[in-house]
Image (cartoon, rainbow, N blue to C red):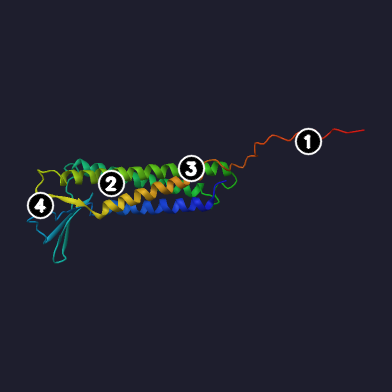
Amino acid sequence: MANAGIQLLGFTLAFLGFIGSIASTIMVEWKASSYAGDNIITAQAMYEGLWKSCVSQSTGQVQCKVYDSLLQLPGIVLGTRGLMMASIIFSLISLLVDVVGMRCTTCMAEQPEQKDKVALAGGVLFIIAGLLALVGASWYGHRIAQEFYNPFTPTNSRYEFGSALYVGWGAACLTMIGGGFLCCNCSGGGSGKAPRHPASSSAGQPGRDYV
C-alpha cells in the first residue's frame, strides 16, 4: 500500500511547481538588458517576457507594452509560450487526477489497487509537465546566451537571463521531483495480495493420524 505521507509530500512539491510555472509564464523578466561592456546606458532597463516588454526608468517609472501581433513574434517566443502553457495544462490535469488517487482522500477507497494506479498516472503527468517547462525555459535561455555571445549583436542590444527563467527552472524541478515521489511510491510494493510463500509441509498434511 502506498505511503500517504510520501504521496502528500510529492503532491505538495508538484503543486508548488505548478504555481511557479504560472508565475514564470506571466512574469516580464524572461530576459533583462545587460550592462556588460563599455558605453552602456544605465538610465533605463529593458525587460522582455512572453506576453509584453517593459522599460524601467532610473526615476522608477515603468512602461509596458503588450506585443501587437501574434504573427510577428519570434519563433522562440511562440514556442516557449506553447511549452509553458502545455506544462500548466498537464499540471492542472495531474492535480485533479492525484486528488482522486492519493491515499489521504476518500475517492475510490474501496479499490486500493486502482487508486494507486490513478496516483501513478498523475505522477507521470507531473513529470511530463515538468519536462515541458524545463525544455521551454532552457530553450529560451539558450537563445539568450547565443545572442549574447554573438559578436554581431550590438552591445546595447544584449540581454541576460531574467528572474522568470530562474523561477521556471525551479518550478520545473519541483514538478518533476513531486511527480517522481508519486511514481516511486506507487511501484506496487503493497498491493494487498497475499504473500507468495510456499506452504509448509506440516501445514499441508493436517489429516495424518497415528495409531
Corner quadrant of residue 60: bottom left
Residue where numbered disc 4 is placed: 156
52 left or right of 173 in image: left
What amino acid is labelled 1 in the image? Ser
Q: Position of residue 25 (x, y in %)?
A: 28, 51
92 left or right of 188 in image: left
What amino acid is labelled 2 in the image? Ala
Residue where numbered disc 3 is placed: 120
- Of callouts 3 and 4, the N-terminal one: 3
SS category of the residue bearing label 2: helix
User: Which is more toward the observer, 56 or 151?
Assistant: 151
Question: CB of mark 4 within 8 Å of CB of mark 2?
Answer: no
Mark toward the viewer: 3 or 1: 1
Task: Give the farthest residue toward the right.
Answer: 211
SS category of the residue bearing label 4: helix
85 left or right of 114 in image: left
Residue where numbered disc 2 is placed: 137
SS category of the residue bearing label 3: helix
Count the numbered circles shown.
Answer: 4
What amino acid is labelled 3 in the image? Leu
- Of callouts 2 and 1, the N-terminal one: 2
Residue where numbered disc 1 is placed: 202
Mark toward the viewer: 1 or 4: 1
